[in-house]
Image (cartoon, helix red, strand yellow):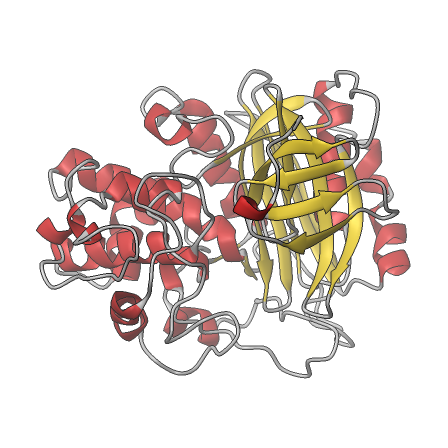
């Protein structure tokens, strides 16, 4: 199939100084287009192909949630049982209630509603370390909850990693091996792995590139939440699985803006499901439009660009069509820079009447208008649309007046 947007990719690589990129477009039963552009590492000469493995970072969460759903059907776990049933030694600290661990369920873990903070004391995005997945997960026991259990959505790696740790404990297999057996092998995903030993030895693998870093880690302790590597060909097969098995996977899609390990979003006005991922030199998007039956995968080996989401949206617009975006700043991409800490892109979206601010790494924050041009999010961030580009800052929600006050 001829997709004119894809013909522009070589020029976009040069414009954004991006080492490499892989793109896939599929229906439920066929791949309309798949290919690679550029090279596996900055300054290298090994071309990217459809079997080249990329880190997909937080897209990993979808695969983990899918494996958990399989475990539920096997009777290994139950979605709504307290996780102390599976991790009897688990404890977490809270200023809101006593024994919060007795209320946290697997569903809370997968839907980011357990109240966890974003990072663990051992093995985080800031200090990766050499600790194991188990040591990383057990360090979560030392954390404090940011919110009462079940009160709100708060994007966090910790819940997904604990869900993966539960699979490991209940199955008696390493997490990466359990997912390989129940998900990757049945779907024929031979170029997909959570196993760092397999990934490190792989020759046809993209190397992440991030400004200011000469070398980035391949193995990370946050395995279930962000440790997956896959190829664009395998990613399309996984998307096709969701397109063909939507009914059996429906529990993953229950929610307004986020289900169980799956984001519910819009691409140029088209309702889509999937996830984005970013970090350690990679940015990626894997989304499918269930009503149109189209999936789009964009994998890149650099973080210094806004290309992944824009390209995915442009492909959806060309292949599926589009609905008119509402007037104003919504449904647009912006470059962001916050106190020298977080760089990348942000999206403003409106989904089912809910305004959202989405960070480059896939975090979604519902917004409420505080006064014209100023919005506050569920986690207490303020977004100022009167600035160009929009700015946001950490504030505590209780210090602000209610919208309309």
Tally the numbered discs: 0
Which residue occupies 54% across, 72% down?
Answer: 203
Residue 210 vertical placement versus 336 (above, below): below
Q: Nearer the viewer, residue 42 or 370?
A: 370
Choose top left, top right, bottom left or bottom right for residue 269. Answer: top right
Image quadrant occupied by the C terminus: top right
Q: Nearer the viewer, residue 108 or 244?
A: 108
164, above or below 331, in the image: below
With 378 as the anchor, is 45 left or right in this view?
Answer: right
Vertical placement of 108 versus 142: above or below? above
Q: Residue at x 51, y 74 (%)?
A: 218
Q: Nearer the viewer, residue 143 or 351?
A: 143
Indicate left or right for 29 with 296 as reference. Answer: left
| Quadrant of the frame with the N terminus | top right
- Residue 359's spot in the image, x, y percent? 64, 49
Give coordinates of residue 222: x percent, y percent: 40, 65
Q: Position of residue 86 (x, y in %)?
A: 12, 53
Placement of 196 over or under 300, stated as above or below:
below
State the residue at coordinates (61%, 45%): 285
Q: Nearer the viewer, residue 7 or 315?
A: 315
């Amino acid at each position: 199939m001829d997709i004119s947007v894809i013909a522009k990719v070589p020029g976009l690589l040069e414009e954004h100084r991006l080492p490499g990129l892989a793109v896939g477009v599929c229906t439920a039963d066929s791949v309309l287009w798949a290919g690679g552009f550029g090279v596996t590492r900055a300054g290298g000469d090994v071309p990217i192909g459809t079997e080249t493995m990329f880190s997909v970072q937080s897209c990993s969460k979808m695969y983990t949630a899918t494996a958990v759903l399989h475990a539920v059907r096997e009777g290994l776990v139950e979605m709504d049982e307290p996780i102390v049933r599976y991790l009897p030694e688990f404890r977490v600290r809270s200023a809101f209630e006593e024994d919060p661990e007795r209320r946290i369920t697997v569903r809370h873990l997968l839907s980011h509603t357990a109240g966890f903070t974003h990072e663990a004391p051992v093995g985080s995005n800031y200090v990766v370390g050499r600790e194991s997945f188990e040591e990383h997960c057990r360090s979560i026991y030392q954390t404090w909850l940011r919110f009462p259990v079940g009160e709100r959505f708060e994007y966090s790696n910790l819940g997904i990693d604990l869900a993966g740790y539960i699979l490991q404990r209940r199955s008696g297999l390493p997490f990466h091996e359990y997912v390989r057996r129940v998900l990757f092998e049945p779907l024929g995903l031979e170029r997909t792995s959570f196993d760092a030993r397999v990934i490190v030895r792989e020759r046809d693998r993209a190397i992440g590139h991030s400004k200011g870093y000469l070398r980035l880690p391949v193995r990370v302790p946050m395995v279930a939440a962000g440790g997956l590597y896959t190829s664009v060909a395998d990613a399309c097969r996984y998307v096709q699985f969701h397109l063909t098995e939507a009914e059996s996977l429906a529990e993953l899609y229950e929610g307004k803006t986020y289900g169980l390990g799956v984001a519910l979003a819009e691409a140029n006005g088209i309702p889509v499901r999937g996830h984005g991922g970013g970090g350690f030199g990679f940015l990626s998007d894997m989304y499918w439009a269930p009503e149109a039956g189209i999936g789009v995968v964009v994998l890149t080996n650099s973080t210094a660009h806004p290309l992944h989401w824009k390209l995915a949206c442009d492909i959806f617009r060309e292949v599926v069509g589009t609905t008119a975006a509402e007037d104003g700043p919504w449904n647009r991409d912006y470059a962001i820079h916050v106190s020298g800490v977080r760089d990348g892109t942000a999206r403003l979206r409106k989904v089912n009447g809910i305004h959202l601010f989405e960070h480059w790494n896939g975090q979604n924050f519902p917004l409420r208008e505080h006064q014209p041009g100023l919005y506050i999010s569920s986690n207490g961030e303020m977004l100022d649309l009167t600035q160009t580009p929009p700015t946001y800052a950490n504030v505590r929600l209780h210090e602000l007046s209610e919208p309309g006050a």
